[in-house]
């Protein structure tokens, strides 16, 4: 996939070209599916949501926006990571509502390197912690979204946020420690 192709199509989409969304999907589909597989690999083994369904739902939510605010390829995938996270949270809420308070859906945060390997946090608890972090520092929360959920690297995150890589690294370290403290309180 050519980065400039995606960026150009995103610019056309932002300019109101309705056909841009249709041309964009084939260019970003495999990367979105990789992100979805990464998310779902951390879910319980009997999870009913499949990577393809997650990709399609995220893309539909993004297309339903009157104007997509993504400026370039990296920014697009940052937005996609946030949308996928929200879909998983919505799915977990629905699942828990169906169980009427039954066992919570578990979500491993081992990749954050903030909890011991044997520990796992509920996706709803993680989302709640991220919402608290966002209230304290939105940029640090966005770094977690893009790195943990979106699989973006420091360079890509820095580009989306308009900061340097050292800032991203510091934000990531702070967020990991903050989330560790926040999520450890319930253990």
Image (cartoon, helix red, strand yellow):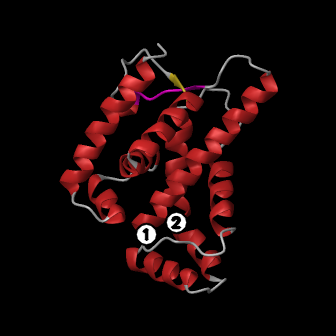
Choose between 171 and 92: the one closer to the eye.
171
Residues under labels 2 and 1: Cα distance?
A: 9 Å
Are the residues tagged 2 and 1 within 8 Å (C-beta)?
yes
Left or right, residue 37 beside residue 88: left
**Is residue 64 found inside the magenta-colored segment of the image?**
no
Mark seen at residue 45 = none
* Residue that appears at 49% across and 27% down: 108
Choose between 138 and 90: the one closer to the eye.
138
Foreground: disc 2 or disc 1: 1
Q: Secondary structure at mark 2?
A: helix
Residue beneath disc 2: 28
Q: Which residues are magenta?
A: 106-110
Residue beneath disc 1: 73
Q: Is residue 60 visible?
A: yes
Left or right, residue 164 beside residue 145: left
* Residue that appears at 68% across and 55% down: 57
Q: Quadrant of residue 3?
A: bottom left
Choose between 7 and 1: the one closer to the eye.
7
């Amino acid at each position: 996939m050519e980065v400039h192709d995606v960026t150009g199509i995103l610019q056309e989409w932002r300019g109101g070209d309705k056909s841009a969304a249709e041309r964009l999907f084939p260019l970003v589909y495999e990367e979105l599916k990789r992100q979805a597989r990464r998310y779902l690999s951390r879910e319980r083994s009997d999870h009913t949501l499949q990577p393809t369904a997650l990709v399609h739902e995220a893309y539909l939510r993004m297309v339903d926006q009157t104007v997509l605010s993504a400026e370039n390829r990296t920014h697009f995938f940052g937005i996609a990571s946030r949308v996928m996270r929200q879909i998983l949270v919505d799915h977990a809420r629905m699942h828990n509502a169906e169980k009427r308070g039954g066992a919570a859906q578990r979500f491993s945060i081992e990749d954050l390197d903030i909890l011991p390997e044997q520990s796992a946090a509920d996706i709803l608890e993680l989302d709640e912690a991220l919402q608290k972090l966002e209230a304290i520092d939105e940029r640090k929360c966005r770094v977690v979204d893009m790195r943990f959920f979106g699989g973006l690297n420091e360079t890509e995150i820095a580009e989306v946020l308009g900061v340097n890589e050292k800032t991203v690294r510091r934000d990531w370290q702070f967020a990991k420690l903050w989330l560790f403290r926040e999520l450890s309180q319930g253990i």
